[in-house]
Image (cartoon, rainbow, N blue to C red):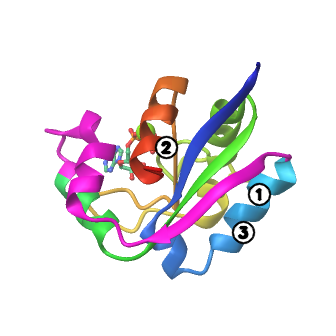
Amino acid sequence: MSKERTLVLIKPDGVARGLVGQVLSRIESKGYVIQAMRMLNADRALLEEHYAEHVGKSFYEPLVEFMLSGPIVAIVAEGERVIEGFRSLAGVTDPTLAAPGTIRGDLARDQGTKVVQNIVHGSDSPTSAEREIQIFFKN
Ligand code: IDP
Ligand code: MG
């Protein structure tokens, strides 16, 4: 059983800029399977649970405010090594440094904000992926 699942979020900047299709297309073109998807307006409690590891960091409150600023899309993608594979598609956290060819490298840049706006979230380990999927897909 080598199949993995990951949680991808298209953040408010990605939705507002009309990039949902491009993100989905990159996931599907790579060969991963979209298993579940929903658009939602997250509330603070949900985001505090999702971003618990970042409590206390300087960007935590701006991050939560940013994620509350508009609708997001939550996606469960499936495939062998999809967790690292999607993070590779996304590129590194800072869009200025993210390689061209990646989602963040091609579609995002520094906006001068306290929190980095970088289009997507992707789980970083099997444990986080299962935890995060439970948060966004409770049933
Ligand atoms: P990741 O999304 O690449 O996994 P994390 O370190 O988990 O990066 O951080 C979560 C999110 O918080 C990032 O995607 C980005 O939006 C924001 N962020 C992370 N580090 C910084 C920072 O140093 N300054 C501002 N915002 C940050
Ligand atoms: Mg992370």
Outermost left residue: 56
**Where's residue 131, x and y in %?**
42, 34
The disc label shown at residue 37, or none: none
**Where's residue 18, x and y in %?**
60, 81
Q: Nearer the viewer, mark 2 or mark 3?
A: 2
Tell me where the magenta segment starts and ends, as one range: 31-60
Q: Are marks 1 and 2 in contact (CB under 8 Å)?
A: no
- Compared to 94, does 56 lie above or below? above
Left or right of 77? Residue 72 is: left
Q: Is residue 54 visible?
A: yes
The disc label shown at residue 22, or none: 3
In depth, the one of 37 and 60 nearer the eye is: 37
Mark 2, residue position = 133
Give the Cα separation between the discs numbered 2 and 3: 22 Å
Give the Cα separation between the discs numbered 1 and 2: 20 Å
**Where's residue 118, x and y in %?**
48, 58
Mark 1, residue position = 26
In depth, the one of 80 and 55 nearer the eye is: 80
The amino acid beneath tag 1 is Arg
The amino acid beneath tag 2 is Ile
Q: Are marks 2 and 3 in contact (CB under 8 Å)?
A: no
Disc 1 on helix, strand or loop? helix
Give the Cα separation between the discs numbered 3 and 1: 6 Å
Q: Residue at x 33, y 45 (%)?
A: 50
